[in-house]
């Protein structure tokens, strides 16, 4: 019979080691797990990860702010999110929904919880390839029923086991949201070329690569080899894999680009949109 606690990780078939772990740093209701200046260099194109889990007061959480050079993915686990962006999109995202915002050359967006329920989820940044980092901004908001399932996994980005996300992400990256019962095993074979892989566990405990993870992120050694997971207790986590982003990360305050010239172009467009939003009274 499976139990809820074990002194040691069960023996699982494994070929990949864990090369870095972190619980991140908490800033109010948000835990910053990965930034471009730390583990983002190790797991790029995934360059930023925030996890949030708190009881909402209904107060604004993410005021209107800019990005360029990246795409942001918000995975809402519980609660409702009101959103608006400078592409003209606005609405409410329900629990289980996914927000995709390809900033490209520049975009502004905001979001805040609705109501006073538990509000939990993730925001991820991915560095865009050079042909998209200064391209046209694009947003996509998927209700929970539009996020495909493949067994225990929901396919947020990319494809897995025949299920394909409708998020128009660049090729070469997967992001899955997985829920396992106590003692349940789950196997992930990354697609060819996906040598970057990591996971973050936010509920329960997860045995993988001869370690047990709980409320933390683990980065796996670079390889195309499979990963074998087993839940200890009811467990919820995300796992991602990708072809490694081949460029240096050139950082602005809200932006990540592949060159200083591309960053300057993106920051100029951010400033232009900001002036327009101020003239319209949408930001101060």
Image (tube, rainbow, N blue to C red):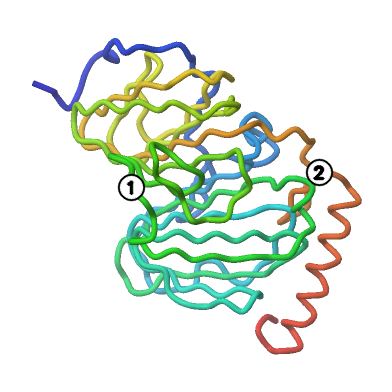
Which mark is first along the chain, 2 or 1?
1
Q: Secondary structure at mark 2?
A: loop
Is residue 270 shown above or below 184?
below
Instruction: Determine crowd level at label 2: few under 14, some 14-19, many 20+ residues with C-alpha closer than 10 A.
Output: many
The quadrant of the image that shows the C terminus is bottom right
Give the residue furthest to the bottom. 280
* Disc ID at residue 46: none
Please give left or right for residue 259 compared with residue 6 in the image: right
Q: CA distance from mark 1 to mark 2?
A: 34 Å
The residue pinned by badge 1 equals 149
Please give left or right for residue 266 compared with residue 124 in the image: right
Nearer to me, 132 or 61: 132
Q: Residue at x 66, y 34 (%)?
A: 38
Q: Residue at x 73, y 45 (%)?
A: 129
Q: Secondary structure at mark 1?
A: strand
The residue pinned by badge 2 equals 258
Please state the horizontal and vertical placement of residue 8, each as a whole percent of the image.
27, 13
Nearer to us of marks 1 and 2 is: 1
């Amino acid at each position: 019979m499976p139990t809820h606690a074990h002194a040691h990780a069960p023996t699982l078939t494994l070929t990949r080691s864990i090369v870095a772990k972190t619980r991140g740093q908490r800033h109010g209701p948000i835990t910053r797990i990965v930034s471009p200046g730390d583990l983002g260099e190790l797991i790029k194109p995934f360059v930023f990860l925030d996890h949030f889990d708190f009881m909402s007061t209904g107060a604004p959480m993410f005021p209107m702010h800019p990005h360029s050079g990246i795409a942001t993915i918000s995975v809402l686990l519980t609660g409702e999110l009101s959103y608006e962006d400078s592409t003209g999109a606005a609405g409410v995202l329900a629990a289980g929904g996914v927000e995709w915002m390809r900033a490209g050359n520049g975009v502004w967006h905001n979001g805040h919880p609705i109501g006073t329920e538990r509000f939990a989820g993730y925001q991820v940044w991915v560095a865009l390839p050079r042909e998209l980092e200064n391209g046209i901004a694009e947003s996509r908001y998927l209700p929970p029923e539009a996020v495909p399932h493949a067994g225990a996994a929901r396919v947020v980005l990319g494809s897995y086991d025949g299920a394909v996300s409708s998020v128009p992400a660049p090729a070469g990256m997967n992001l899955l949201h997985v829920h396992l019962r106590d003692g349940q095993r789950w196997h992930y074979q990354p697609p060819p070329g996906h040598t970057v892989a990591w996971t973050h566990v936010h509920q329960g405990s997860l045995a993988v690569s001869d370690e047990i993870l709980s409320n933390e992120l683990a980065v796996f050694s670079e390889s195309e080899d499979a990963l074998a997971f087993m839940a200890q207790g009811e467990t919820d986590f995300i796992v991602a894999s990708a072809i490694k982003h081949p460029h240096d990360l050139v950082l602005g305050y809200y932006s990540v680009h592949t060159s200083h010239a591309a960053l300057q172009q993106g920051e100029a467009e951010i400033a232009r949109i900001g002036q327009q939003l101020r003239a319209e009274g949408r930001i101060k």
